[in-house]
């Protein structure tokens, strides 16, 4: 029995977090909303990250997604993607910024926070 192989197969890999808040420089955000992005578009983005949507719930403030490799949260101005395992979280950054600019009324991102342990 290969103890090293069993040890590495037991753990899923590092947790990764991407949190991005969006705003407009002119402050006109009434018609801007990240939740305008359709589920099919999120599914395409998540393929780049190597995970998929398992389930979905929403309320008036937040769309929540359970993913094959953790979770994603989308509010009017904030996008949070938390993954683990062998996901490629950073592959989502540029496509996300493009989608937000094209589909939501927001321009460039205001803040970006991320960690990779």
Image (spheres, rainbow, N blue to C red):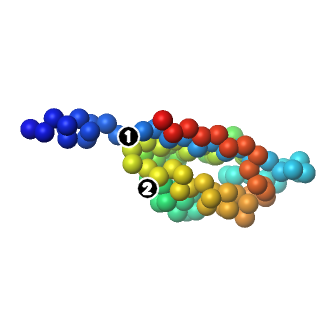
The location of residue 102, given as percent across then percent down, is 72, 64
**Which one is nearer the viewer's eye here, 31 or 71?**
71
Quarter of the image holding residue 19? top right
* Residue beneath disc 2: 50
Q: Residue at x 35, y 40 (%)?
A: 12
Circle 2: element type: loop
- Quadrant where the N terminus sits is top left
> For the residues carrying marks 1 and 2, which lies nearer the camera in this image?
1
The answer to whether one can see residue 60 in this image is: no
What numbered label is drawn on residue 13?
A: 1
Q: In this view, does 49 lie to the left or right of 85?
A: right
Give the residue displayed 39% in from the left and 44% down from the top: 85
Q: What element carries label 1?
A: loop
Is 14 or 78 nearer to us in this picture? 14
Q: How many labels does the image show?
A: 2
Q: Residue at x 13, y 39 (%)?
A: 2
The answer to whether residue 7 is left or right of residue 62 is left
Question: What distance separates the C-alpha of mark 1 from that of mark 2?
Answer: 14 Å
| Mark 1 burial class by Cα count in 10 Å: few <14, some 14-19, many 20+ | some
Which is nearer the N-term, disc 1 or disc 2?
1
Which numbered tag is attached to residue 56? none
Which residue lies at the image location 62% right of the left edge and 59% below the top edge? Answer: 94
Rendered location of residue 27, percent (x, y): 89, 48
Q: Where residue 108 appears, x then y in whole percent?
A: 76, 54
The answer, for residue 45, to whether it is visible in the render is yes
């Amino acid at each position: 029995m290969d103890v090293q192989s069993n040890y590495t197969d037991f753990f899923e890999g590092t947790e990764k977090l991407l949190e991005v808040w969006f705003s407009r420089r002119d402050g006109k955000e009434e018609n801007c909303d990240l939740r305008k992005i359709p589920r099919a578009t999120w599914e395409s983005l998540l393929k780049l990250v190597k995970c998929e949507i398992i389930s979905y719930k929403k309320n008036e403030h937040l769309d929540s997604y359970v993913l094959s490799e953790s979770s994603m949260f989308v509010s009017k101005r904030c996008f949070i993607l938390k993954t683990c395992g062998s996901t490629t979280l950073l592959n989502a950054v540029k496509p996300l910024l493009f989608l937000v600019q094209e589909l939501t009324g927001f321009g460039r991102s205001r803040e970006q926070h991320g960690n990779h342990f």
